[in-house]
Image: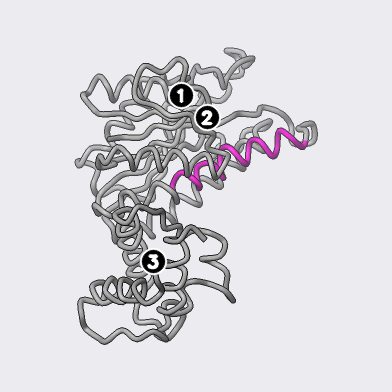
Amino acid sequence: MKTEKAKEIVIGVITEALESKCEVAGDMQLIGGESLLDSMKLVEVCVLLEDLADDNGFEFDWTSENAMSKSRSMFRNVNALAEEFAKQSNGE
Amino acid sequence: MIIVTGASRGLGKSITERLISNGENVFGLARSTKNLDIESFECDVSNYKSVKNAVREVKKMKLPVNGVINVAGVASMNLAVTTDESTVQKVIQTNLIGTIYCCQLFAPLMLRQKNGVFINFSTIAVPLALKGESVYAASKAGVEGFSRIFAREMADFNIRVNCIAPGPIRTDLLRGITDTQIEKITSQQVIPRQFQKSDVCDLVELLIDEKSSSLSGQVLNVGGV
């Protein structure tokens, strides 16, 4: 999967979680004080992405050390999450 | 479907049998599934990858997971100063970390449906501070602490998390404990008698039933303290 496609998917899922109340940009933070998602919404996003990954024949692991690492976390913004989703879809 | 860890022996086996007799669809996890005649999968709860594999197996079944009952555990009855390093590691890794792994890795299956129940196992040795059970009780005190907070984290998803803390129940874990020693423990309970596996199964039934929908983050001490 290309990163652009993954970004489209991730933005779609986050928009759904936020009930289309705001526009989702690539640099939008997913964790921390400026995030529009609370921790429970973030979990919902991850579960939805896991389902979409299943549909696309790969496993999306959002509990890895990489996911949780502060500096390299896939949750630091939308682009990072999309990149990780694309990477995992390509078996990287 | 209800998942029971430690389903091949002792309390886990009794709980599995009770649930099956109630018509529940049970999926058993155990280090060895040779003696299990239900749908099951070999899983060492103390091993993260092993639990992940079990989750994958359950996902393949595409059935809603309504409950996870974390019974798998090991006991150690010894003074802290005479407990060897490997036993300390094994008890904490299986009882505490194993429970955490099963909760965190199976939870996403319930988050989807916004419904479910976790039942974790502690011991009455925690509130009674029983001499000779420091390492075991420490692992279970950890389970209680984890469960209380996990219950809060799961509440928004309509998932309940509770603990059952049995006293001395006749299982393999109590090998070598004399009747006198058991009586000494049960005498400290509110109801001073030895309870049976069937009493624990009754509590499991209660906690998975919708009638207990107001209970989460609780520790039910069998016999009372």
Callouts 3 and 1 close, C-beta under 8 Å:
no
Q: What is the number of callouts on the image?
A: 3
**Residue receiving disc 2:** B188
Up the image or down, A11 lies above or below B123; here it is: below
Circle 1 SS class? loop
Left or right: residue B60 versus residue A32 is left
Q: Residue at x 47, y 68 (%)?
A: A84
Q: Residues within 10 Å of mark 1 (few under 14, many from 20)?
A: some
**Residue receiving disc 3:** A1
Circle 3 SS class? loop
Mark 3–mark 1 distance (CA, rounded to whole Å) = 63 Å
Q: Quadrant of residue A65?
A: bottom right
Up the image or down, B141 lies above or below A62; here it is: above
Callouts 1 and 2 close, C-beta under 8 Å:
yes
Up the image or down, B14 lies above or below B125; here it is: above
**At which x and y percent is residue A19?**
20, 76
Of the residues shown, which amino acid type is indicated by label 1? Pro
Q: Residues within 10 Å of mark 2 (few under 14, many from 20)?
A: some
**At which x and y percent is residue A46?**
37, 63
User: What's the magenta region?
Assistant: B85-103
Same chain, labels 3 and 2: no
Mark number displayed over residue B192 = 1
Q: Residue at x 51, y 51 (%)?
A: B145
- What subunit carries mark 1? B
- What subunit carries mark 2? B
- What subunit carries mark 3? A
Same chain, labels 1 and 2: yes
